[in-house]
Image: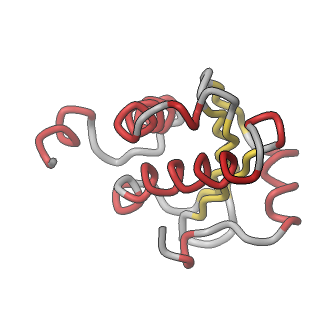
């Protein structure tokens, strides 16, 4: 994921955690909060409950890779925080991508429909 799309500062992470709307799934929790810019920013986190450092880093890489394909189709002006859950590292890329698509649709952040996304690939 390009660095310009990343949520970096801890104050931004805290703001999204405090004020954001939560969309849970057994693999990942997505928190969504509006921001003051016209860009979409995504933060990724994995706590120690996910596993040791190697496993947490794999989970974060997996989330970033799956999110990358959705970035051009997201509504601008939002901050997203993706929190990995314990079973995420065992899930494959396509499973994580499908979960993220479902959560983004639930949050009404995708500017295209599901059928269009399947035709595009």
Q: Residue at x 54, y 56 (%)?
A: 61
**Residue 104 in the image: x percent, y percent?**
48, 38
From the viewer's side, name the closer residue of 77 and 23: 23
At horizontal 69% and vertical 29% (from top left) the residue drawn is 86
Q: How many marks?
A: 0
The front one of 54 and 67 is 54
| Residue at (61% x, 69% y) in the render | 6
Most extreme residue toward the left is 119
- The residue closer to the viewer here, 112 or 92, is 92
Residue 16 position in % (x across, y down): 78, 51
Instruction: Classify residue 51 as left or right of residue 41.
Output: right
Q: Is residue 44 above or below residue 109?
A: below
**Residue 43 screen position, x and y as percent:** 66, 58
* Residue under the point 60% across and 59% down: 42
User: Seen in the image, is 9 located left or right of residue 61?
Assistant: right
Q: Is residue 66 above or below residue 68?
A: above
Q: Is residue 86 above or below residue 117?
A: above
Quadrant housing residue 68: bottom left
* Horizontal side of residue 67 vs 73, given as left or right: right
Question: Which residue of the protein is positioned furthest toward the bottom in this rendering?
Answer: 4
Residue 47 position by quadrant: top right
Looking at the image, residue 84 sits to the left or right of residue 12; the answer is: left
Tell me the quarter of the picture where residue 113 sits: top left
* Rendering colour mode: secondary structure
Residue 63 screen position, x and y as percent? 53, 49
């Amino acid at each position: 994921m390009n660095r310009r799309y990343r949520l970096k500062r801890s104050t931004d992470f805290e703001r999204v955690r405090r004020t954001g709307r939560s969309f849970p799934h057994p693999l990942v929790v997505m928190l969504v909060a509006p921001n003051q810019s016209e860009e979409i920013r995504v933060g990724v986190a994995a706590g120690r409950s996910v596993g040791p450092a190697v496993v947490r880093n794999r989970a974060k890489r997996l989330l970033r890779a799956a999110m990358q394909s959705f970035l051009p189709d997201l509504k601008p002006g939002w901050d997203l925080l993706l929190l990995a859950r314990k079973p995420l590292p065992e899930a494959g890329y396509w499973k994580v991508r499908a979960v993220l698509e479902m959560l983004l649709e639930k949050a009404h952040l995708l500017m295209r429909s599901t059928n269009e996304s399947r035709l595009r690939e």
